[in-house]
Structure formats: C-alpha cells, structure tokens
Amino acid sequence: MTQKDLKDYKYNQIWIKGRLDYIEEYKTNITNMTVIISDMPKGSKKVDDIMAEKITELIKTTDELLEIIVEEDQKQKIILKQLDKIEQPYKLILEKAYIQGKSLVTIAEEMNYSYRDICRKNAIALKKFDDIHNVLLCH
C-alpha cells in the first residue's frame, strides 16, 4: 500500500462503519417488509410481487455493499501488516498519526519530542512505509 492508502486509513474506517450501519438499516427494512407480506390477506398477487421485487433489490444492494466492505477491509489489513514491518519509533508515529488520527503536535507531546523532530521522523517513517511497499511489489 502507498502513503495515500495509509493517510486514507482512518477515513476508510469511518466509511466502513457507515456502510455497515446502512446495511443494518437495510436488514431492518427487509425484515419489516417480510412481516408485512406474510401478514397480508391472500389473493393480492400483484402486491406480493412488488414487495418481493423490493426485497430482492434490497438484498442485492446489501450483498454488493458487503463485497465492497470486504475489499476495503482487506486493504486495511494489508496496511497494518506493512506498518508492522517498520521499526520503532517510526511505526508508532505512523500508527498515532494515520491509524488513530492524532495530530503531529499531539504526537510530539505524547512522545516527548519537539514538533520539529516529529515532523522529521514522520517524513522518514512515510519514506520507510513506501520503501516496504516497493520491496513487496518486487517480490
């Protein structure tokens, strides 16, 4: 994965959570529609067909969304594995900045470094992250 993937990690986590919430809402709608269909008086075939089509569409949309979420989750795992190959303190700096979403000012304070040192170390850490990516591409 590249620096951009690393920098997008936190936002992608938020996106995944939002999509999972959306799927949960879809599942509730499907459940409610199924109850409505089963409680309806018999004899209205057209209404049954329309409701069945809506349920089918909801399930299809949910399945497509789940596929995208699984792909994104796999990327997240690759980023974490790549991050694990970096030595400290660079790994910790990248973890705090891009996984936890902390600012470099906060990281400098937490790690007892000056802001300037953290900026320099962050640049080195990002280079190391890219170097690992490039090594993995060669294999």
Image (spheres, grey):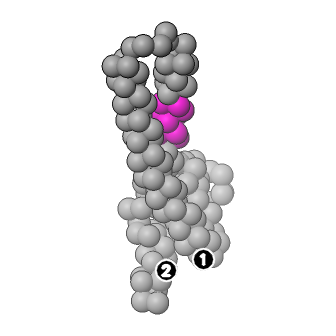
57 relative to 104, above or below = above
Residue sitting nearer the eye, 66 or 53: 53
Identify the residue at the far top of this view.
Answer: 41
* Front residue of this view, candidates 124 and 73: 73
**Quadrant housing the N terminus:** bottom left
Disc 2 residue type? Ile
Residue 137 visible in rendering: yes
Q: Residues within 10 Å of mark 1 (few under 14, many from 20)?
A: few
Around disc 2, counting alpha carbons within 10 Å, would you say few (fewer than 14), some (14 to 19), or many (20 or more)?
Answer: some
Residue 51 x %, y %: 40, 23
Which residue is denoted by mark 2 in the rendering?
A: 132
Q: Which x, y percent locates residue 14?
A: 49, 42
Q: Which residue is mark 1?
A: 85
Instruction: Between residue 42 and residue 117, name the one nearer to us.
Output: 42
> Disc 1 marks which amino acid?
Lys
Residue 96, position as x, y percentages in the image: 59, 55
Q: What predominant SS class does the magenta segment belong to?
A: helix
Q: Is residue 23 magenta?
A: yes
